[in-house]
Image: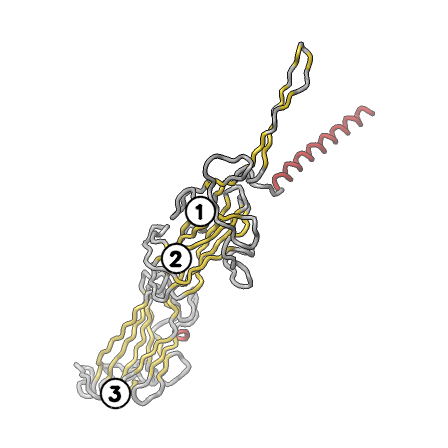
């Protein structure tokens, strides 16, 4: 009986030991540990001493110890700058603080500061053609550990990388303003260059580094530049660079206006002439090119009429002189190439000031105004108010009468 109890306890002990070994392995995997890609930290003192054991006449003698050798591990300066995303950063014209995102990694074996500089690069890293520059270009360092540039209140506003440990990566943002006149497909390439500086003084950018010349000094931390060549820098210069590019995605709008005499008091619709009393049909067309990179959000269309004309309140038909749809509905809107559900043509009153297209009421001349958020309302599938997508057009038609 005692033997069985002993065996049972032995099995329990074996299970406990196995559990401890598994737990220890998991703990080691989960516990943060220092990466070793950068190697032994600089300024680490490495000592060594040899021992000789020997016998005389078969009798062991006192071991003889060599002198102690020691040296300091030198500073291997190395870093990597990389663009984040592997693709263009798409932007719109006339926008500010557009963000290019990079990472800077200290792949050396010493805590370092890093100076940062962004410069226009005539070579597009993604194979396109660089053809413009952004303005107000600035560089900031991620400081609040929240993904994406977070301006203000001291967040993400650092101008250099301070005290970056070995095998540690920090995010850097390059910000620029996109000029108002840029067209869809325009590209502005930028390169971020990081340069290693001396660490050890938190809160200020360290001094420039100088590579140690001549023979090694074992008890002094020498400096060796080990960086590879980046996009615009050379190898072993204590710097590295990576490139990204803005690509403009914009609407490509065109506006045309046609003028056609459709009826006069004498010839009626048969070869009418531009005489007093004749009706002139104006057709205003706004189109967004099929190859445009973005939708346009139309706000208003305005047309100031000549004082020698008066608005036709009824949008008459040339052949009959009767209103096209109803008396007082003097404006017509058509859409083409659109996925909107709303049917066209749509008619708007000449006198109302709330239905989307209006005339200011002047007896002659005056101003026609189309409020496009009303004319092109929010609509499924996926239309915002006033939106004109690539390949779509909208047309405003009305008549005036020569006075």
Q: Which mark is residue 246?
A: 2
Of the pair 109 and 221, the residue shown nearer to us:
221
Residue holding disc 1: 239
- Return the residue nearer the eye: 361 or 60: 60
Q: The N terminus is located in which quarter?
A: top right
- Using the rendered view, name the quadrant where residue 24 is placed: top right
Mark 1: secondary structure = strand
Inspect this view and state whether residue 37 appears: no
Rounded to the nearest whole Å, what is the CA distance between mark 1 and mark 3?
71 Å
**Dot placed on the residue nearer the N-terminal end, 1 or 3:** 1
Secondary element under disc 2, as helix, strand or loop, is strand
Q: Position of residue 250 (x, y in %)?
A: 36, 63
> Residue at point 48% right, 54% down?
172
Crowd band around label 2 with a 10 angstrom C-alpha radius: few (<14), some (14–19), many (20+): many
* Crowd tier of the residue under label 1, counting other residues whose Cα lies within 10 Å: few below 14, some 14–19, many 20 or above: many
Provide the secondary structure element on which disc 3 rests. loop
| Picture mark count | 3
Dot 3 alpha-carbon crowd within 10 angstroms: few under 14, some 14 to 19, many 20 or more: few
Residue at figure coordinates x 37%, y 56% from the top left: 120
State the residue at coordinates (40%, 71%).
Answer: 386
* In the image, residue 138 above or below residue 335: above
Mark whose residue sits in front, 1 or 3: 1
Task: Decide which of tag 1 and tag 2 comes sooner along the chain.
Answer: 1
Task: Please tell me whether residue 175 is drawn above or below residue 209 in the rendered image.
Answer: below
Q: Residue 98, percent across and down?
A: 43, 61
Would you say the residues marked 1 and 2 are in contact, meaning their CB atoms lie under 8 Å apart? no
Instruction: Identify the residue under disc 3.
Output: 308
Dot in front, 1 or 2: 1
């Amino acid at each position: 009986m005692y033997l069985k109890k002993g065996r049972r306890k032995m099995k329990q002990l074996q299970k406990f030991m196995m559990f401890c070994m598994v737990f220890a392995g998991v703990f080691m995997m989960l516990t943060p540990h220092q990466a070793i890609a950068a190697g032994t930290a600089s300024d680490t003192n490495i000592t060594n001493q040899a021992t000789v054991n020997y016998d005389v006449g078969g009798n062991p003698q006192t071991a003889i110890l060599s002198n102690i050798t020691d040296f300091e591990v030198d500073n291997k300066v190395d870093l990597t700058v990389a663009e984040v995303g592997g693709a263009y950063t798409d932007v719109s014209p006339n926008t500010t603080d557009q963000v290019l995102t990079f990472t800077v990694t200290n792949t050396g074996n010493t805590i370092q500061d890093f100076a940062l500089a962004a410069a226009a690069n005539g070579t597009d890293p993604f194979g396109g053609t660089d053809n413009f520059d952004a303005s107000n270009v600035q560089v900031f360092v991620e400081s609040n550990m929240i993904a994406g540039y977070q301006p203000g209140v001291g967040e993400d506003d650092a101008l250099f990388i301070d005290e970056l440990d070995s095998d540690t990566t920090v995010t850097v943002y390059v910000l620029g303003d996109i000029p108002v006149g840029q067209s869809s497909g325009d590209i502005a390439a930028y390169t971020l260059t990081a340069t290693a500086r001396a660490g050890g003084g938190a809160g200020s950018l360290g001094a420039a580094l100088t590579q140690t010349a001549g023979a090694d000094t074992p008890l002094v931390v020498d400096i060796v530049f080990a960086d590879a060549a980046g996009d615009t820098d050379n190898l072993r210069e204590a710097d590295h660079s990576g490139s990204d590019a803005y690509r403009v995605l914009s609407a490509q709008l065109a506006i045309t206006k046609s003028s056609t005499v459709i009826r006069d008091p004498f010839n009626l619709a048969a070869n009418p002439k531009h005489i007093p009393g004749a009706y002139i049909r104006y057709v205003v067309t706004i189109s967004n090119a099929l190859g445009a990179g973005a939708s346009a959000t139309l706000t208003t269309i305005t047309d100031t009429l000549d004082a020698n004309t008066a608005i036709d309140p009824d949008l008459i038909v040339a052949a009959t002189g009767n209103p096209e749809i109803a008396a007082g509905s003097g404006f017509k809107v058509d859409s083409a190439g659109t996925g909107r559900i709303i049917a066209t043509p749509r008619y708007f009153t000449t006198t109302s000031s709330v239905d989307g297209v209006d005339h200011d009421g002047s007896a002659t001349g005056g101003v026609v105004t189309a409020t496009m958020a009303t004319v092109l309302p929010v609509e499924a599938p996926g239309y915002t108010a006033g939106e004109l997508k690539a390949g779509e057009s909208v047309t405003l038609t009305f008549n005036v009468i020569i006075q």
